[in-house]
């Protein structure tokens, strides 16, 4: 099923919100980019969250149905985080939200991350780079959780918005000057709104 999906949409200006946007209605029919294990691997590749070599290895090593189960967990995580963002967007996020974030912290605690010294990009210099042991398909949830945690810790929740398109469910961080962004994309909902306004005139 997932191999027929259109390319995923990355319009939120924050990968953690793009996870929420991995289910959307770009035209008339809802599209879920995480319907199964294949869809999850494809979305992770498009998001650049997991190296292609790791994704290929996971596809090869996973037991039957194992990646589908991880995709189901990813959808559950997505919907939990949607509720959190919807409940807090539009106002500053404070430390009193920490209790609500425990499910995310429990997932982050599973990480087997480490740092290693690598050659820096073409400069001939050395750099310390984060890495992670990908021991099981469940570890594919970690970069998703990390992206969500970055939204929580690094973004101004007063500028987290939902698209004003009547049927649109996409969310984004408004980084425009004056914070006047209203649409997930001018090409999608912005033009649709202009067209409808023109019909009403």
Image (spheres, rainbow, N blue to C red):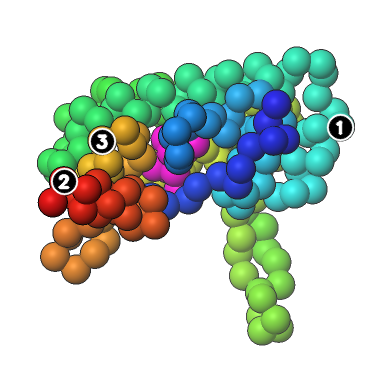
Please tell me which residue lies in front, 192 or 154. Answer: 192
Q: Is residue 8 visible?
A: yes
In the figure, residue 152 lies in which quadrant?
A: top left
Instruction: Using the rendered view, name the quadrant where residue 35 is placed.
Output: top right
Q: Residue at x 66, y 76 (%)?
A: 121
Question: Residue 181: where, in percent of width, then height?
Answer: 22, 56
- Distance of mark 1 from mark 3, alpha carbons? 42 Å
Residue 140 belongs to the span the image colors magenta: no
Tell me residue 138's x, y (percent). 65, 25
Q: Position of residue 120 (x, y in %)?
A: 66, 74
Q: Residues within 10 Å of mark 2 (few under 14, many from 20)?
A: few
Decide whether the magenta segment is chiefly helix, strand or loop: helix
Mark 1, residue position: 60
What residue is pinned by disc 3? 166
Asked which secondary structure carries label 2, the reply is: helix
Q: Which mark is residue 200?
A: 2
Which region is colored magenta?
15-22
Is residue 141 among what the camera can see? no
Q: Callout 1: few (<14), some (14-19), or many (20+) C-alpha neighbours within 10 Å?
A: few
Q: Relative to the observer, which residue lies in front, 81 or 23?
A: 23
Residue at (78% x, 33% y) in the render: 58
Q: Residue at x 57, y 34 (%)?
A: 33
For the residue labelled by badge 1, is the local secondary structure a helix, a strand or a loop? helix
C-alpha distance separating marks 2 and 1: 55 Å
**Residue drawn at 16 percent across, 46 percent down:** 200
Q: If you read the primary sequence from the N terminus, does the residue marked by circle 1 or circle 3 appear first?
A: 1
**Image coords of residue 75 (percent x, y):** 51, 23
State yes or no: discs 2 and 3 in contact (Cβ < 8 Å): no
Question: Quick one: which residue is furthest to the bottom in this view?
Answer: 123
């Amino acid at each position: 099923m997932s191999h027929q999906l259109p390319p995923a949409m990355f319009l939120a200006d924050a990968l953690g919100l793009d996870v929420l946007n991995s289910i959307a209605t770009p035209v008339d029919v809802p599209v879920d980019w995480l319907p199964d294990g294949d869809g999850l691997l494809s979305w992770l590749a498009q998001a650049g969250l997991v190296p292609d070599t790791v994704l290929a290895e996971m596809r090869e090593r996973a037991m039957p149905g194992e990646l589908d189960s991880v995709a189901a967990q990813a959808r559950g995580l997505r919907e939990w985080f949607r509720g959190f963002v919807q409940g807090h967007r539009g106002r500053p996020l404070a430390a009193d939200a920490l209790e609500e974030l425990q499910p995310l912290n429990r997932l982050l605690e599973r990480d087997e991350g480490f740092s290693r010294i690598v050659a820096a990009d073409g400069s001939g210099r050395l750099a310390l780079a984060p890495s992670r042991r990908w021991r099981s398909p469940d570890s594919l949830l970690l970069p998703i959780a990390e992206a969500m945690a970055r939204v929580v810790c690094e973004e101004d929740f007063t500028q987290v918005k939902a698209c004003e398109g009547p049927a649109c469910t996409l969310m984004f961080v408004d980084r425009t000057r004056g914070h006047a962004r209203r649409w997930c994309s001018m090409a999608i909902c912005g033009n649709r709104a202009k067209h409808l306004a023109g019909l009403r005139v």
